[in-house]
Image (cartoon, coloured by chain):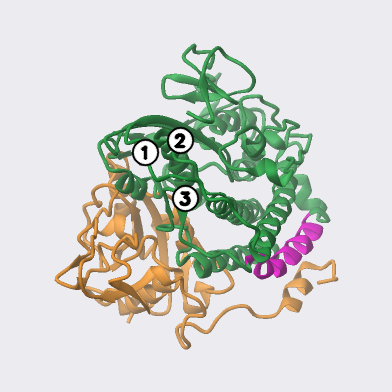
Chain colours: A green, B orange
Amino acid sequence: MRYYRYGEPEGRLIGKLGNYDLYASVISSASNYVQPDQEIRSRGEFNFSYGPSTGGLMESVRFLISTPGEVINNISAHTEFKQRSLKIIGNTIEDAQLIIERLNGFHSASHAIAFLLSIEDALGIIPDDKVQAKRIIEIELERIRSHIYVLSRMVEPAGFGVPLSFLNSLEERVSRLIGKYTGHRFFFGINGINSVNVDFAGIYVDLLPIADEIRTVQESLVGSAIFVDRLQNNGKVRSEKSTGTVARSSGFHFDARTDSEALPYASLGFMPVVELDGDAYSRLIQRINEIFQSLEIIKKMDTYSKLDIKFTSKDNSSFEKDGKGIARVESPAGDLTYLVEVKDGRIRKLDILTPSEINFPVFLESMKGGVLTDFHFNWESFGIWISELAVSIK
Amino acid sequence: MKSKNWFLKGVNRGIETERFPLSPPDEVAAWSGGIAGKGNANCPTDAITNNKWDAEKCIYCRRCFPNYKPTGNLARTEPKKSHGQFKKSFFIYPFDFGTCGACNVELRALSYPQYDLNRLGIFFTNTPRHADAIVIMGVFTPKMRDAFLLAYDAMPEPKTVIALGVCAITGGVIGKNPDHVSVIDIPGCPPNPYAILDALIRVRK
């Protein structure tokens, strides 16, 4: 395992990965991770059941909200309604990848790349620089679309029709760009072991008009006092057990792009930006800032390909058929880790730690003390996908 | 967009809505429409047998490439029944059985300016009580079955079911499809928004 070693707890605790505690560069069998309490303890309030199927939620999930009418005194959630059981153990790597891509389709590139990096780690394959560069472009494109999507979901409950249409239009344009370059709007079918079958040359120029419009929307959104008022102090949270945008919007510099070596972001001089307040407004600003960072990363990658800088190809003429590997990448939602064991070219064991798993308890905690009308703004600001939570591997 | 007034900003931006179905789709990702070719397909879902492509099973994994290539046409199946009574007003209720999220996003995209389903008299509804059609997505999950039956029972007559995406039609590579009788199957993994709009239009004819 190139990116990780077994050892005593050290550094940032990211979460529970299978039977291990996952730290920034160590996996430890000692269990220091305690799942936060998600139980309802109502004191005379009525329980409002929201979900599992209703128009306001994109995916099936039931929230049980304990409230005297407005204030949310407690909240718990049932994510098991759409629980999927994915048959991956015993599959070939190629067959397993088909399923991994569909674990969370909206962040499919991140899942496929994290999975393939862990496989390459297990088999002793060192990916080519050019392949790694294309993987970075994929994940950053995915991040841009995902952040625009979350922004639009945050604007929607405010009934803010015009900016909602602007953001929806931008998201669709990014989706079409992804479709134009990769042949599929969700990156399905382009990734393989040490390969990405796409030519991204010129994509930055295509993204430029979108960048200009995001800046305009940003200026207008933060200039709307009514909208900003719905977000400030809503879902305020500062937790070391959070990840991704949620963590970075509350002052933590947590980012797999800086503390994981699986993808070569270090060579780009990447440093995460952070916001400090930890409320829904900070998460909105954080996402906008990260969109521009992603554009800068894509610009650098695109420039490299135009200059035809020599990318080194590694000698992978002989590689192992068995092994254990682990890789962590920064998906649009946060730390995404795959721990895989391969035997005779087939998946023998697979553990996945998703950012939605990490951030979901943090969301529930942040909602306590809020009011019902704040719920959607806060929920959407976390960018959680139930498909990443309600899933088991068999 | 220098105005501070949102309404004026919207007007200044102009019309982005496309003329589909009166004009062809502006841009369809290659691997989301029809596929044709011959020879060995190496298909994991048996979507290609005897050189014949079955849209309802295809997950667009591209293992059949280069023997099989995209045609550029929308993937479509024929409605099993016509619902002309919904021609002027068609309310649909999305129902997530067990998706990966991609079908949900593509269905939502119909409300985006490029597609604007409302101009065609099609609307999303937040409750099955106002729905003419329930659009099921994803593979079968036991706990959503009761929710589905409750939602279906709550719908007023006449009502219908639409299956969106390969998971809901055949289960794809993820699992088993929900037990249902749909008026139209919208193939794709996930289906392209144009293909979804096309199917919703055709089911009302």
Reading the image, the residue beneath label 1 is: A81
Q: Which of B103 and A93 is in front in this view?
A: A93
The image quadrant of residue B35 is bottom left
In this picture, is B94 found above or below A34?
below
Answer whether residue A9 is visible to the viewer in this image: yes
Reading the image, the residue beneath label 2 is: A121
Image quadrant occupied by the N terminus of chain B: bottom right
Q: Name the spot of residue A199 as percent of width and height, x first.
A: 53, 65
Chain on which label 3 sits: A
Query: In the rendering, which numbered label is found on residue A108?
Result: 3
Element type at marker 1? helix
User: Which residue is depicted at the point 29% across and 56% down?
Assistant: B168
| Amino acid type, mark 3 | Ser
Q: How many marks?
A: 3
Q: Which of A19 and A368 is in front in this view?
A: A19
User: Which residue is depicted at the point 62% across and 30% down?
Assistant: A242
